[in-house]
């Protein structure tokens, strides 16, 4: 009987050891948010602000190949001005309008190796696409991490024509917004006004006029501000989309409310979807739970069974 107890204790000790080791292995495999990805996303947004340097003088050399976008100077050096907030360039939101350049998107860059991306930024494919005088290698590597791992296809989240959110959960968006964003932007999104082309915009104006930019900046923050980074908070793109959906419903500025007044307030997105919202909520919750604890639980159960088997075998041999 004493030996039996000893075996039990031994196997439990072994089990505990095993769990702590495998548990740690699992924890280290869990990637968590990558600081380089966030830095890369902010460099993509406005690399000279992210690096804290002055923008180069004059226009980016490639700029002269187009005439539809009449901006000049610093803006022309931003990745986002040519490749878009939706990463689709001429294939996306910048197909037309004042930002249209005809330049390609970078969604395909997700399939390039980090070396190929860095090479492209040093003029490897197109000699005028050369940032090596401005971007240190470390910054190019961070951009590569972002392009390879941080891009999403916005057409999953934002309707390309109506610019409304697809399949969002506005109640969930409100929860996230009130908890994380309202302190600075105000409960109605009017506490910080954004000066854009001579007009003061509320957060709702930005969310409605350029939801792609809103989503990018909600996921990755704005360089040089204290703004929290959704990605670092563990937010999925769908969480960002929900916040965007709620932000689109907040207070519009005077000028913009008049211009885009038509077609708004018809209540087409708010009502009629509580059921799907509840279900996606539950499913997302369950999904997150199993991703985090499921594998650990599986290992634990397996080990317990194995331990029991060992005990049974040893008992038989007595
Ligand atoms: C002035 C416009 C402009 C700016 C600014 C610009 N690019 Fe480009 N980019 C282009 C054009 C045009 C091409 C296509 C070049 C070619 O034909 O190879 C390109 C190609 C690329 C490619 C290769 C895409 C592919 O599928 O082969 C990547 C990656 C890329 N750019 C990333 C960036 C990043 C990151 C930045 C910011 C540091 C940036 N670009 C800034 C115009 C621009
Ligand atoms: C600590 C204060 C703070 C918090 C909290 C904060 N922001 Fe911001 N946010 C800022 C500042 C500052 C700016 C930049 C203002 C400027 O450019 O004039 C900004 C800019 C933005 C922009 C860019 C607007 C544009 O014109 O492109 C978006 C979108 C935005 N915030 C959304 C959010 C969301 C969503 C949250 C919650 C996840 C949030 N912010 C939380 C301070 C904050």
Image: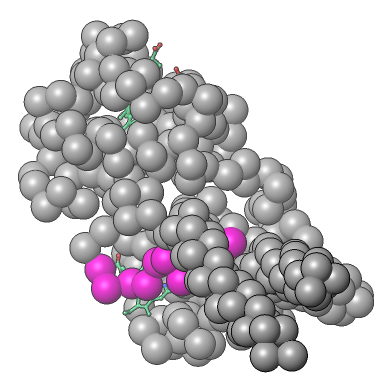
Q: Nearer the viewer, residue 156 or 185?
A: 156
Q: Nearer the viewer, residue 275 or 294?
A: 294
* Residue 275 placement, left or right of 312: right
Magenta span includes 227? yes
* Residue 57 placement, left or right of 291: left
- Using the rendered image of the protein, determine whether residue 129 is visible from the camera's viewpoint: no
Q: Identify the residue at the far front of this view.
A: 318
Q: Quadrant of the C terminus?
A: bottom right
Q: Position of residue 154 (x, y in %)?
A: 62, 46
Q: Nearer the viewer, residue 303 or 207?
A: 303
**Which residue is at 15% across, 24% downward?**
132
**Which residue is at 26% across, 59% downward?**
223
Identify whether 38 is placed above or below 204. above
Q: Position of residue 5 (x, y in %)?
A: 68, 88
**Which residue is at 46% across, 71% downward?**
233
Q: Quadrant of the N terminus?
A: bottom right
**Which residue is at 65% across, 68% downward?**
296
* Residue 139 placement, left or right of 99: left
What span is colored magenta in the figure?
225-236
Q: How many marks?
A: 0
């Amino acid at each position: 009987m004493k030996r039996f107890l000893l075996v039990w204790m031994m196997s439990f000790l072994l089990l505990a050891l095993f769990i702590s080791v495998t548990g740690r292995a699992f924890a280290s495999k869990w990637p968590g948010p990558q600081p380089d990805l966030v830095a890369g996303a902010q460099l993509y947004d406005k690399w000279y602000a992210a690096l804290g340097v002055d923008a180069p003088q004059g226009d980016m050399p490639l700029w002269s190949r187009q005439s539809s976008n009449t901006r000049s100077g610093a803006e022309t050096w931003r990745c986002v001005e040519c490749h878009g907030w939706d990463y689709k360039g001429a294939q996306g939101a910048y197909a037309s309008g004042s930002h249209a350049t005809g330049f390609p998107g970078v969604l395909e860059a997700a399939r390039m190796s980090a070396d190929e991306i860095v090479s492209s930024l040093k003029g490897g494919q197109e000699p005028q696409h050369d940032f090596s005088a401005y971007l240190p290698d470390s910054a190019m590597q961070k951009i590569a991490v972002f392009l390879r791992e941080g891009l999403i296809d916005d057409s999953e989240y934002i309707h390309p024509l109506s610019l409304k959110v697809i399949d969002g959960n506005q109640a969930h968006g409100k929860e996230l917004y009130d908890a994380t964003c309202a302190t600075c932007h105000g409960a109605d999104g009017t506490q910080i006004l954004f000066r854009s082309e001579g007009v003061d915009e509320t957060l709702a104006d930005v969310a409605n006029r350029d939801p792609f930019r809103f989503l990018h900046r909600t996921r990755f923050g704005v360089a040089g501000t204290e703004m929290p980074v959704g990605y670092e908070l563990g937010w999925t793109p769908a969480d960002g989309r929900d916040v965007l959906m709620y932000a689109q419903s907040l207070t519009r500025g005077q000028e913009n409310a008049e211009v885009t007044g038509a077609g708004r307030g018809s209540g087409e997105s708010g009502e009629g979807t509580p059921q799907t919202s509840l279900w996606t909520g539950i499913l997302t919750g369950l999904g997150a739970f199993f991703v985090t604890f499921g594998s650990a639980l599986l290992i634990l159960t397996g080990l317990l069974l194995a331990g029991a088997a060992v005990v049974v075998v040893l008992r038989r041999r007595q």
